[in-house]
Image (tube, rainbow, N blue to C red):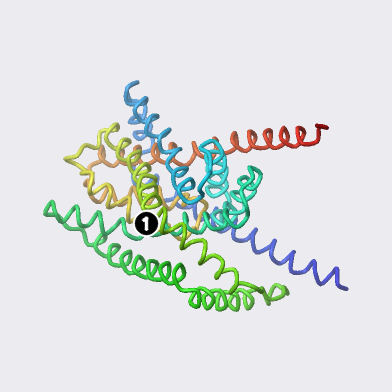
């Protein structure tokens, strides 16, 4: 009876994950196949991509390669002692999982732990680094629409959608900063957050016939001590690294727009930054893996709205967005597979060396 009772929650959880995966992939497919082709002629889009010169291709690849190393700076800032090679392997493997698996950001944290722990980093330090890097990423995502709106205002331009996103982002930014300050400076508040979070998670676990979670209040208290020290010493490095990481992705988008004929007279760089910031904020909740479909359609719609409705402009914008996603989404997935094989090979080599007699 116990075996049957234990297998029921597992089967229910497996079925729920399968349904979530099917729904998210169906949404992505509907957006990519049903909506995107209506925004521009895909034949003309392909012709626009093929018109790129060799120099333009080299420039784009340079921006794409730099972007691959952007997130590693955030990991190294949040985890002292982390080497560049190890950060690159962990970052690319986690990015590949995040971009291909429903709720991939959660799975990506587990993958990051597995990779970094194999290189000798402690579980507490990895958990602290994951929380801080994720929190700083959220802070930049929340604040970026307001920065773009300010840049547009300095140029004498306004955008209603961007102003709305800025208001929402600033409210979320203020709440996130307040919680971060309280959790990292007040032990009592950290324990209270851990206790409340534990109760909520325990309630959510009941339908799955799983027991309550325990020790979250003490866990948050330990996190408070470690995070306070890291934040005091490295908050400026975390902020700078996170800004560089997000701007590196935007530079790839801007380079794609310029190389495919969408000049500053059509879409200025503050307008492109505004579209980028709104889509990043809108896709902060992972409805589809890596925002697949949502990012393509959202960016295209926002940029076409800014640029105008001429057929040649629409084709160039769609071509730029698809090329941007190929360089920041598809490339990371393929590279993540290569990095996973390299990590497994290195783990086997270390294991065989440890098994040899001294």
Front residue (pair 151, 38): 151
Vertical comparison of 115 with 255: above or below: below
> Outermost residue toward the top?
54
In the picture, the quarter occupied by the N terminus is: bottom right
Which residue, as the protein is rendered here, is positioned at the far left? 156
- Most foreground residue, 169 or 180: 180
Examine the image and state in which quarter residue 19 appears: bottom right
- Is 30 on the left or on the right of 298, as rendered? right
| Residue 80 on image: x %, y % | 50, 48
Q: Which residue is nearer to you in this view: 212 or 357?
A: 357
In the picture, measured across the screen, residue 166 lies left or right of residue 136, that is left
- Where is residue 235? Give x, y as percent: 39, 55
In the image, what residue occupies the spot 54% across and 35% down?
85
Residue 344, position in %: x, y? 68, 37
* Location of the C terminus (image quadrant): top right
Residue shown at 63% from the left, 42% from the top = 119
The answer to which image quadrant residue 267 occupies is: top left
**Residue to which mark 1 is pinned:** 141
Position of 108 with respect to 250 (left or right) is right
Q: Residue at x 71, y 35 (%)?
A: 350
Q: Secondary structure at mark 1?
A: helix
């Amino acid at each position: 009876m116990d075996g049957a009772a234990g297998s029921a929650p597992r089967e229910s959880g497996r079925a729920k994950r399968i349904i979530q995966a099917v729904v998210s992939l169906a949404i992505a497919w509907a957006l990519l196949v049903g909506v995107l082709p209506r925004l521009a002629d895909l034949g003309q889009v392909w012709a626009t991509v093929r018109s790129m010169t060799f120099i333009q291709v080299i420039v784009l690849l340079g921006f794409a390669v730099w972007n691959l190393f952007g997130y590693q700076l955030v990991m190294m800032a949040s985890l002292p002692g982390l080497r560049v090679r190890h950060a690159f392997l962990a970052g690319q493997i986690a990015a590949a999982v995040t971009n291909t698996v429903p709720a991939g950001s959660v799975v990506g944290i587990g993958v990051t732990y597995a990779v970094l722990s194999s290189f000798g980093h402690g579980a507490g330090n990895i958990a602290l680094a994951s929380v801080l890097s994720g929190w700083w990423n959220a802070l930049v995502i929340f604040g970026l629409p307001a920065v773009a709106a300010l840049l547009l205002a300095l140029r004498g331009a306004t955008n209603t959608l961007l102003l709305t996103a800025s208001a929402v982002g600033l409210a979320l930014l203020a709440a996130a900063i307040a919680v971060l300050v309280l959790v990292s400076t007040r032990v009592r508040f950290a324990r209270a957050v851990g206790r409340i979070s534990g109760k909520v998670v325990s309630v959510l676990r009941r339908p799955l016939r799983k027991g309550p979670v325990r020790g979250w209040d003490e866990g948050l208290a330990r996190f408070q001590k470690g995070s306070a020290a890291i934040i005091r010493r490295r908050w400026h490095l975390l902020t700078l690294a996170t800004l560089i990481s997000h701007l590196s992705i935007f530079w790839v988008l801007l380079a794609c727009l310029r190389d495919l004929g969408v000049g500053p007279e059509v879409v200025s760089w503050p307008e492109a930054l505004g579209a980028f910031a709104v889509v990043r904020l809108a896709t902060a909740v992972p409805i589809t893996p890596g925002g697949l479909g949502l990012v393509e359609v959202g960016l295209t719609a926002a940029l076409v709205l800014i640029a105008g409705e001429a057929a040649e402009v629409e084709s160039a914008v769609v071509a730029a967005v698809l090329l941007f996603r190929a360089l920041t989404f598809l490339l990371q997935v393929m590279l993540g597979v290569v990095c996973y094989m390299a990590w497994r090979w290195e783990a086997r080599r270390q294991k065989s060396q440890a098994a040899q007699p001294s």
